Image: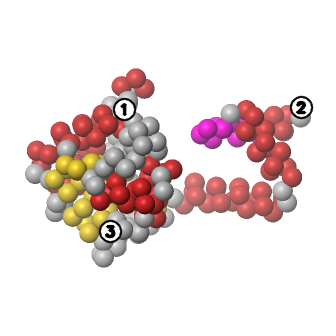
Amino acid sequence: MEKSLERLIERLQILPGVGRKTAQRLAFFLLRIPEEEVRGLVEAILDAKTNLNLCEICFNYTKRQPCSICGDEDRDHSLICVVETPAEILPIERSGRYRGVYHVLHGVLSPMDGIGPEDLRIKELVKRLKDTSVNEVIIATNPTSEGEATAIYLARTLKPLGVKVTRLARGLPMGADLDLADDQTIWNAIEGRREL
């Protein structure tokens, strides 16, 4: 196999969920499409990597500070939805019904992987709650064992601050990722959230 093709296949395998066979299919697809399409893809990746930073308030990806959600005065800033990654914001926003703001942890507690509270954006969330008027925190971590452990830890950490802590309802199947759920399931989960 040509070294250039082998290198492309190896680089594509860094993407999540992409094994060797998928990387090969993607590589051959990229070789078949017009060069301007490939250039457009490369430019979009470089533009995002170069120009997107973390919002100084919620830690979502943004070009400006604060991000468009945190800077929106029409949103309910007394309601914060805590998610694992920026990817989970998209399906909640797609539901069109949530008008609060967000806080991105950038992961979940996972002792097996050496990820503890200090590796997540938990201290920033606590500071945010102390510095602003927040009435409720909705914990929207994925319904996995790590997501549940993170939710319990957050509830124990945040409740002493006098804020109402709720969890998304069980409209989401156990073991599923939030960014794969349909809009109605997400809305039902938000509506049926419960206090921890």
Q: CA distance from mark 2 to mark 1?
A: 42 Å
Residue range of the region highlighted in magenta in the rendering: 8-18
Which residue bears the numbered disc 3? 99
**Is residue 76 found left or right of 21 in the rendered image?**
left
Is residue 91 shown above or below 151? Answer: below
Q: CA distance from mark 2 to mark 3?
A: 52 Å
Amino acid type at mark 2? Met
Query: Residue 156 appears at what percent x and percent y?
Result: 18, 39
Label 2, secondary structure: give it. Answer: loop
Name of the residue lying farthest toward the top: 112
Pick the front one: 44 or 34: 34
Which residue bears the numbered disc 1? 145
Q: Residues within 10 Å of mark 2 (few under 14, many from 20)?
A: few
Q: Earlier in the sequence, mark 2 or mark 3?
A: 2
Which residue bears the numbered disc 2? 1
Label 3, secondary structure: give it. Answer: loop
